[in-house]
Amino acid sequence: MKFETQLQKVIQRNSNVTSYRFNRPDGFEYKAGQFLNVTLNHNEKELSKYLSFSSSPTEPTHIEFTKKLSDSEFSNALRNAKLGDRVKIDAPYGKFTFEGEYPKIALLGGGIGITPFMSICKYATDKGLNNKITLFYGCSTPDDVVFREEFEELAKTNKNLKLVFTVSRPTPNWKGKTGRINDDMIKMELPDFKEYIFYACGPPPMVKGMEAIIDTLGIPKEQFKIEYFTGY
């Protein structure tokens, strides 16, 4: 579906990650984990980018994407965006989705690759799904953990959602895991890991690393879904 919509809200998630919400048109449907193509007008030219939904299909009034802002022209256009600005959207795309079809899923996220997992976790919580979901999310520092409060709120409501946050450069008051996501961490948190479908999303090097871990764990390829996410 191709449509034009207006910028409804801008939410600063951390120092360099921002969410952009737009009015959701009547009749527009998508699945948790899918992505969209956004076209902005900036300096009299059109700029387009594929970005994952960070909103859930259960949210009727808006759609949202979340981006790590870089020095790119597209990021600069977003920095200058004002409420009410119109954008063109072409969506939905992608098969990196979850609608409750697997009893147990493990989500392996790194950096800004967390966005489709926000969509999936919110969808499962809003729908009251009984599926077991474990989110492993690795970042450099505690401040880099995007949606931390939002995920923690979801986990309070959804007793089937387990959060495993890990950082490679912890602060003295950090109470989560440290280091990168690895096979030992997965085995410790998920003793029944072979019963899970694994999803991995993040920068290409991180996803390649997750592929190696899945191989080490002996997980069949048909139980592993990947989405490369540059975020630039």
Image: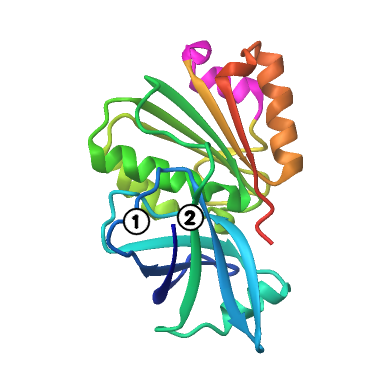
Q: Is residue 157 visible?
A: no
Query: How many marks overall?
Result: 2
Q: Is residue 197 above or below residue 38?
A: above
Q: Position of residue 192 (x, y in %)?
A: 47, 12
Q: Is residue 91 above or below residue 158?
A: below
The N terminus lies in which quarter of the figure? Answer: bottom left
Report if the CB atoms under discs 2 and 1 are less than 8 Å apart.
Answer: yes
> What amino acid is found at the position of numbered circle 2 in the picture?
Ala
Q: Nearer the viewer, residue 113 or 96?
A: 96
Q: Is residue 189 magenta?
A: yes
> What amino acid is found at the position of numbered circle 1 in the picture?
Phe
Q: Please report the bounds of the magenta region as a residue range.
A: 182-195
Disc 2: which residue: 91
Q: Is residue 107 above or below residue 217?
A: below
Which residue extends farthest bottom?
Answer: 43
Instruction: State how far apart marks 2 and 1 are (Cα).
Output: 9 Å
The C terminus lies in which quarter of the figure? Answer: bottom right
Residue ID at (53%, 66%) = 14
Secondary structure type for disc 1? loop
Using the rendered view, name the quadrant where residue 83 is placed.
bottom left
Disc 1: which residue: 28
Residue ID at (76%, 41%) = 205
Q: Earlier in the sequence, mark 2 or mark 1?
A: 1
Residue ID at (74%, 33%) = 208
Q: Is residue 154 visible?
A: yes
Report the side of 60 relative to 105 (left or right). left
